[in-house]
Amino acid sequence: MLDQLSRAVISDPEQSTHADVYKEAHGLLGSGTAPVCFRKRTLHETQVRTKSGLTENMLSNKLCFASRIISRNGRDACRELIGIFFVCDRSLTVYEFRRFGKNRTNALPFIQKGVYQHQRGKKKGKAYDLNDFYIGANLTFRSVDHNLPESVKQNPVLTLRVISIDEADMDFLKAPSMELKQECSKQEIDDNKVFKKIQGILRETLSKRGVRLITGLGKYFRQVDKNRNGLLSQADFKEALKVFHLEIPERDFETLWLILDDSESDKVDYGEFTSAIFGEMNEYRKTFVRKAYMKLDFNKTGNVPVVDVIKSYCAKKHPLVLEGKATEEEIKSSFLEALKESCSNPNEVSYSEFEDYYEGLSTGIVNDDDFVNILRNTWGI
């Protein structure tokens, strides 16, 4: 990707020698000599510093990061996105890695290079800066402004979650940057307090029936979502809480709604609602959940036949099997029963259903390595 960006430096007109420019301006170049702008220029003949274009300064003061699309569509959720944030002009670009055949991988433009603003939250309308890039951060863009797949354009706001950053880049940029402040606004701190309070109220319920509760809620929301846009009303959420016997004080619910419904549309994404009241597994864990699903969904359709899930599931190293308290078949049957209950279609598993299962399982596992080992042993990743 950087090689492609560097071409602009090599081909910049300022790289031409003063002698060549003078000769061209006064018509002194030989008849068989191509104009300076069309002449092939090698890297060793290139001056490093230029005043315009993608200069050395721009390429050296950059932050590389990996991100994923927050989406219930498995094909979109598993896209591999790599971005670059240029500190000097606060612009960014995002590329998608696409595999063509066995040995060919291309980096294709996903978000064109430009200066972009937050589309949601307390910073709506403000341009991105270095403070906005950390693991777990959300980057929002207007879908209509970009040449995106139709499945992604269904949502007016594209949300990318930062899943990793180049620590070497960040350490380099932190030193000279006077504006870098790892601070949260008072409003963000207050919002987090509301989330933590509600999560504390529901913690005991979640610890007793985490998997079935989260997978059940996910299935319920998908059935209620007739428009299939992921948005539901306040009345829909209150009814869901009643159906699943989840008690949230009315005052806390109203405060939560004001935070989530920042566009005042009386509609909230049910994925955001679930994350707010239960919390969310960290990006380290989610990376392995995505890897497991991508291994199952080798055709990248966004849905995996249950038959393929059964074939791939391995319970040999499950703790209960190793302790002799259960057989492989019992563990496998228990897993499939819980997974099938969450599936809208009994013959296939979507990414959101697969993720919901592990979101519920994650609530009962404190150690990240223990959680990751379960995925590695089960799916061979």
Image (cartoon, grey):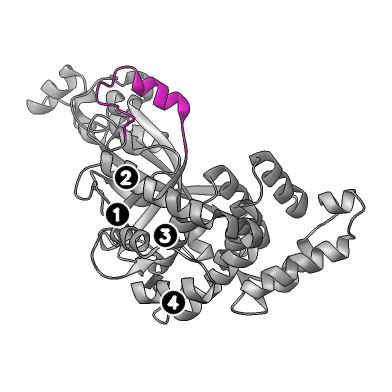
Q: Which of marks 2 and 1 is in front?
A: 2
Instruction: Decide which of tag 4 and tag 3 comes sooner along the chain.
Output: 4
Q: How crowded is mark 1: few (under 14 residues within 10 Å), some or many (20 or more)?
A: some
Q: State which region is magenta.
A: 164-183
Across and down, in percent, residue 24 comes to 13, 27
Question: Disc 4, disc 3: CB below 8 Å?
Answer: no
Could you say where residue 96 lies in the image, as x and y percent from the top left?
45, 50
- According to the picture, the residue beneath numbered tag 1 turns out to be 141
Residue lying farthest to the right in this orientation: 324
Name the amino acid type tagged 3.
Answer: Glu
The secondary structure type at the circle numbered 2 is helix
Please indicate whether residue 345 sits to the left or right of residue 149 in the image.
right
Q: Which of marks 4 and 3 is in front?
A: 4
Alpha-carbon span between mark 2 and mark 1:
25 Å
Q: Position of residue 346 (x, y in %)?
A: 66, 79
> In the shown orientation, is residue 116 left or right of residue 110?
left
Nearer-N-terminus badge (3/2): 2
Most distant residue in the left direction: 26
The numbered mark at residue 239 is 4
Q: Can residue 330 be seen in this view?
A: yes
- Give the mark nearest the N terminus, 4 or 2: 2
Location of residue 143 with respect to 23 vertically, above or below: below
- The tag earlier along the polypeptide, 1 or 4, is 1
Amino acid type, mark 1 = Phe
Nearer the observer: mark 1 or 3; the answer is 3
Q: Residue at x 30, y 65 (%)?
A: 156
Q: Label for residue 272?
A: 3
Q: How far is disc 3 from disc 2 in space, using C-alphas?
A: 17 Å
